[in-house]
Image (spheres, rainbow, N blue to C red):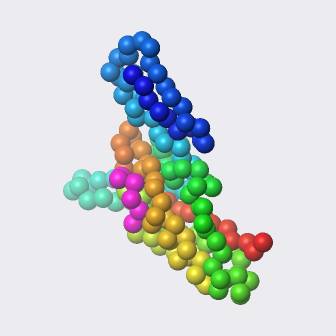
Amino acid sequence: MAKIVKNGSCLLLIIALTSCSSAEQAAVQEQEPESFNLFQLVGVFVADADGKLELKRVEDSEVERIPKAIGSPAEFFRGLGYPEEARRNQIEGVTRMHLTVRSSGEIEDLEIIDKLGHGIEDLIIGFLENGSFLPGIYLGETVAMRVEISVPFQLP
């Protein structure tokens, strides 16, 4: 068995010279892609007695994995510039948003908490909508999670 795995900027060729159990093969195949923490946990969506999803506040320590952005920070934010209107008006600060990362890794329900304006939030939303994410894991299950992102903007 041979497999190519990306580790940072390196590609690794893994060759198994001995036979592996199916569980060992599955563990190698399920290796996560490179990812990084981008979010802070707000809550986990769990089904109530009627099957309706509701947001449950939990501690980070209760969650096996908070959703992560796939790739490196440099790859993820490549091309993120400073909106011209914000630069012209010398706008600096931190914009905060809440969003849901679904169990599929897709995002939805973006809500701006702290707005800087001048095109900054539109730029961040565009990056998030085009990004790829690993979903969160809670109690051994891949679930939708509500998260927060804070992005600082400072003029050079």
Q: Which residues are magenta?
A: 103-108
Q: Is residue 134 left or right of residue 103?
A: right
Image coordinates of residue 139 in percent, x first then y, are 39, 40
Quadrant placement of the C terminus? bottom right
Near-viewer residue (98 or 20): 20
Where is residue 13? Give x, y as percent.
50, 29
One can see residue 20 in this view: yes
Q: Residue furthest right?
A: 156
Instruction: Check the image and report above or below for 125 versus 36.
Output: below
Q: Position of residue 99 (x, y in %)?
A: 46, 65
For the image shown, how many numbered marks are present on the structure? Answer: 0
Residue 68 visible in this rendered orientation of the protein:
no
Query: Which SS does the magenta portion mostly show?
Result: loop
Q: Where residue 154 appears, x then y in whole percent? A: 73, 72
Is residue 87 found left or right of 43 in the rendered image? right
Q: Residue at x 60, y 42 (%)?
A: 9
Tell me if 46 is positioned left or right of 98 in this view: left
Above or below — where is 55 with respect to 139? Answer: below
| Furthest residue toward top | 18
Query: Residue at 65% of width from left, 86% of height from top?
Result: 85
The quadrant where residue 81 appears: bottom right
Say which of 93 and 131 sits in front.
131
> For the view shown, which residue lies furthest in the left direction?
50
Q: Tell me if residue 100 comes above or below residue 117 in the rendering.
A: above
Residue 105 among those drawn in magenta? yes
Q: Quadrant of the N terminus?
A: top left
Q: Quadrant of residue 54?
A: bottom left
Which of the two residues, 102 or 11, is positioned nearer the viewer here?
11
Is residue 40 shown in magenta?
Answer: no
Q: Residue at x 38, y 16 (%)?
A: 20
